[in-house]
Amino acid sequence: MKTNDKIDAARIDLALAELRLGGIKLAWSTLAATADKEGWPAARFLAALVEQETAERSRRRFARHLEEARLPPNKTLDAFDFDAVPMISKARVQALAAGDAWLESGANLLCFGPPGVGKSHLAAALGFALIENGWRVLFARTTDLVQKLQIARRDLALEAAIAKLDKYHLLILDDITYVAKDHAETSVLFELISARYERRSMLITANQPFSEWGKIFPDQAMTLAAIDRIVHHATIFEMNVDSYRRKAAIETNRGAGRPATRATIKNST
Ligand code: ADP
Ligand code: MG
């Protein structure tokens, strides 16, 4: 490059940075060299620049949405063993991962089952796939979110806090039945559920089926009203299988050839 060219390049970089065209800023000089060498028509060069900017923006958007989602790491659909939960169809889950119909109508997804069967894994994996498809997701342990909402209520900002969650097309409430059982805690939860009803989707995981919720949450009438809203437009996955965690632990032990001295471990508990 000649000195003048260098000055021009620096000026272009500066202007691109100011215009927030980071994708073009990264790519233009290489593309310009190729274009000069291969004698590209101007429109082809421009198209290539625009393509770079679009790709860079969608990369950045994905990274931003992934970070804000707070998903537990490494839980993907690829890593999920569907053979372990024969009642759940992989095709069905893949269709849900596209998002479209159910997220647009604010429908819900419920995963029930005992601990260790993959409810949180499936929820996180679906969240990840949805983010890849351009949706916004928040994964929350229900107890943590309820704590935040209670603080908001104390500050007379509950409505605003719930409205802020509207930006998420899907709110994952993991372990809903772990919410501590006093009235104040459950009532913010139920306000959240009412606010999202038929507008914004939720994915709820629970160790106990609905039939037990009356015993878990303090207010029967409120619980029934909440269940009513949750199930009105919902897909339900009943994951009644053995704990994957326990099965995996047993298999690891077998694979490692547990020493004979520990072979009687099952009587020791
Ligand atoms: P739950 O939320 O139902 O208690 P988790 O989703 O936390 O269960 O699963 C427990 C552990 O077992 C996690 O490490 C998870 O990745 C793994 N796991 C559970 N089910 C499966 C599965 N079907 N395929 C792969 N890993 C699984
Ligand atoms: Mg879980």
Image (spheres, rainbow, N blue to C red):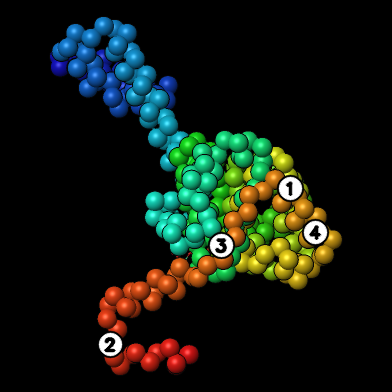
Between 68 and 252, the one lying in front of the other is: 252
Instruction: Quote the CA–CA distance across marks 3 and 4.
Output: 23 Å
Q: Which mark is residue 157?
A: none
Nearer-N-terminus badge (4/1): 4
* Element under disc 2: loop
Amino acid under disc 1: His
Nearer-N-terminus badge (2/1): 1
* Element under disc 1: helix
Percent coordinates x, y for residue 10 in the rendering: 27, 21
Between 14 and 152, the one lying in front of the other is: 152
Camera-nearest label, 4 or 1? 1
Q: Which mark is residue 232?
A: 1
Would you name the residue on which mark 2 appears? 259
Q: Quadrant of the N terminus?
A: top left
Mark 1 Cα-neighbour bin, 10 Å: few <14, some 14–19, many ≥20: few
Mark 3 Cα-neighbour bin, 10 Å: few <14, some 14–19, many ≥20: many
Residue 94 visible in this rendered orientation of the protein: yes
Nearer-N-terminus badge (3/4): 4
Would you name the residue on which mark 4 appears? 224
